[in-house]
Image (tube, grey):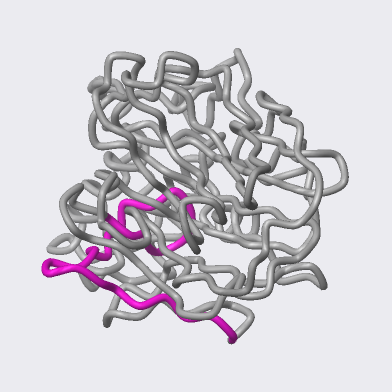
Amino acid sequence: MVRSSMHRASKYDKKIGGLVLPGQAARYTLTTGKRIALERCVKTQAISPMLQVPYVAYLEDLVKHASGNRPDEAYIIFNKWLSRELDETTLRALAECVGIGIEEAVVSCHYAVDANTLALWYLDDMVGVVAQDETGNYPLSFKGPGEPAWTADSKCGAGACQFDGLDDFLENSTLLDVVPASGTVEFWFRPSSTLTTATAGNIRFINKYSSSTHNMIIWFRGSADATRKGRICIYISAGAQEGWASSTTTTWTAGTWYHIAGTWGATGLKLYVNGVLEGPGAYAGSWDDGTYTNFIIGRHAVSGADPFDGTMDEIRVSNIQRTTFIV
């Protein structure tokens, strides 16, 4: 498992220029002393008195919601305030003054396209109704009467995609029409409500569907499934043969980001949660029958059932059975 710099958590607090930052990404109330330290940082930038208030507010936002150990959260906040037409150079300098790196977040959380990448969506577009694929081959179209919504409240980078749990979904018409012998589908998700063994319905995050006997699904299983309720699974079927790999995690907390990776190949099926293998499963052979529907994110590929309510980010599809992930 690859741990990026966004996860260098320490049990020790970090003291910079009289300002104590928590070692974890904590939310806390600013004391008078901490607020004075923030104002001191703003004054070092020779900002006009008329403009100092929003910059102090920006620093308060950073320090309340992101420590130096969580540049992913810092980058979200940075982009939020940059969109309010504040000076980019000053915003970066102020973040450095309180020990929070902004550039680090961009480098640490995005994958680069490699020889085994079939598709990679950063979901940073933030405009329009198409999410561009970094390989240039498989753009995702926004679908549904309401369509998914762009949001700056992302796991990584400038944006993410928010689903309403009713009829939103993303699709590409040709991805995985030819199924590789080995593969990985991975993504970050954040549920809008907590999912447990008591949650009634299934949720389909990603699926490629031909029929009830030929498909690949990564989904959350609801309470009706006595064996897998509360678990996220990768399921593959090809005729009479089918296989499952399921998480051991059964509680998915509202507002918390989780990384999921489902893989298939010579070693069977694997399901990873936050980079940790939780679900090995037996499966051998191909699941390709050559007559698949579109590659769908956020609901059932045909009926529209099992919609997802929450946010997704950083989706990657590979033609290799990956074992390490940036989490």
Q: Which residue sits at x=35%, y=67%? A: 170
Q: Which residue sits at x=12%, y=69%? A: 145
Residue 258 spot, x, y in % from top left: 48, 35
Q: Is residue 97 above or below residue 245?
A: below
Magenta-span inclusion, residue 270: no
Residue most toward the right? 266
Q: Is residue 106 above or below residue 65?
A: below
Q: Can residue 43 be seen in the rendering of this structure? A: no
Q: Which residue sits at x=53%, y=80%? A: 174
Along the viewing direction, whichever of 56 and 293 lies nearer the viewer:
293
Q: Which residue sits at x=59%, y=86%? A: 136
User: Which image quarter holds the N terminus?
Assistant: top right
Magenta-span inclusion, residue 150: yes
Residue 302 spot, x, y in % from top left: 33, 62
How many numbered marks have been drawn onto this rendered protein structure? Answer: 0
Residue 210 spot, x, y in % from top left: 50, 64
Along the viewing direction, whichever of 165 and 327 lies nearer the viewer:
165
Q: Identify the main secondary structure in magenta.
A: loop
Residue 130, quarter of picture: bottom left
Q: Which stretch is magenta?
A: 137-162
Residue 78 relative to residue 304: left or right: right
Residue most toward the bottom? 136
Along the viewing direction, whichever of 106 and 12 lies nearer the viewer:
106
Q: Is residue 150 above or below residue 138?
A: above
Residue 297 spot, x, y in % from top left: 40, 59
User: Which image quarter holds the C terminus?
Assistant: top right
Residue 113 relative to residue 236: left or right: right
Q: Can residue 111 be seen in the rendering of this structure? A: yes
Residue 151, quarter of picture: bottom left
